[in-house]
Amino acid sequence: DAKTTQPTSMDCAEGRAANLPCNHSTISGNEYVYWYRQIHSQGPQYIIHGLKNNETNEMASLIITEDRKSSTLILPHATLRDTAVYYCIVRVPSNYNLTFGKGTLLTVNP
Amino acid sequence: GAVVSQHPSWVICKSGTSVKIECRSLDFQATTMFWYRQFPKQSLMLMATSNEGSKATYEQGVEKDKFLINHASLTLSTLTVTSAHPEDSSFYICSPPRDTQYNEQFFGPGTRLTVL
């Protein structure tokens, strides 16, 4: 799987949009961008994924640049419960052996 | 999404004892189970992969005789930490791969092991 680079930490005010960047300049053509988050002392949780088009679901939006070398996860209205470590992982969907980087600790402040 | 449970959710034990962690896939049959561990303030690291009816495979640096994995059925995989020591204190998470529309991968809630 391609390596990703994420900021170590970010802060966001409650109710505002949280924009979490991820660089994956070595992504291969068949690799997707997946985002997971891990709330403290819980197992990771899937958020969203995409190949090249922007995606949106009930949790978040994913913006992937045209060259696919970077992406941004957007939580449109962050709440205190969104405080977590967010992991950006690029992988071939059939590869279930996920490699977790350090992720971004998002702290949502009241 | 898939439901994965782990038991216990947390355990405290004395050094030298053995601890068994159970991971159950509640709504599908898992022929494979990934076991991860996470030390404080670190990311998840894959420890081993169990396969139903066959021997588990271990990642480099993980002692197979210390971390015994049993995958006797399609809904249950167990990880036993034998002769636990304080350095084994960690957060253990299981994850059964499942072919779904998005192959999003599901994870158990984790087991916090503290060895005194």
Image: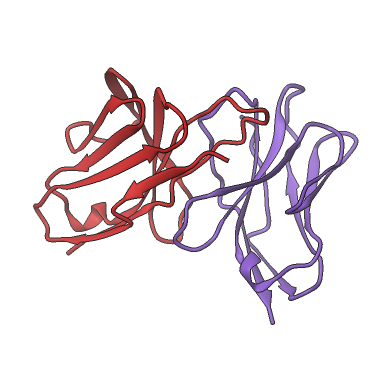
Question: Going 74% across and 68% down the picture, which residue do you hit?
Answer: A78
How many marks can you see?
0
Q: Nearer the viewer, residue B10 or B60?
A: B10
Q: Is residue A64 left or right of residue B88?
A: right
Quadrant of the rendered structure where residue A11 is? bottom right
| Residue at the far top in the pictured view | B54
Question: For chain B, what colour was chosen?
Answer: red
Task: Return the x and y of residue A7 as percentages of the image width and height.
Answer: 68, 57
Question: Going 72% across and 31% down the picture, which residue do you hit?
Answer: A32
Q: Is residue A70 left or right of residue B12?
A: right
- Quadrant (top left, top right, bottom left, bottom right) of the C terminus of chain A: bottom right
Question: For chain A, what colour was chosen?
Answer: purple
Task: Return the x and y of residue B108 as percentages of the image width and height.
Answer: 44, 46
Up-down relation of residue B61 to residue A102 (above or below): above
Q: Nearer the viewer, residue A74 or B85?
A: A74
Task: Return the x and y of residue B90 as percentages of the image width and height.
Answer: 32, 55
Question: Going 67% across and 28% down the picture, which residue do you hit?
Answer: B101
Q: How is the image coloured?
A: by chain
Q: Is residue A81 left or right of residue A65?
A: left
Up-down relation of residue B95 to residue A72 (above or below): above
- Quadrant (top left, top right, bottom left, bottom right) of the N terminus of chain A: top right
| Residue at the far bottom in the pictured view | A110
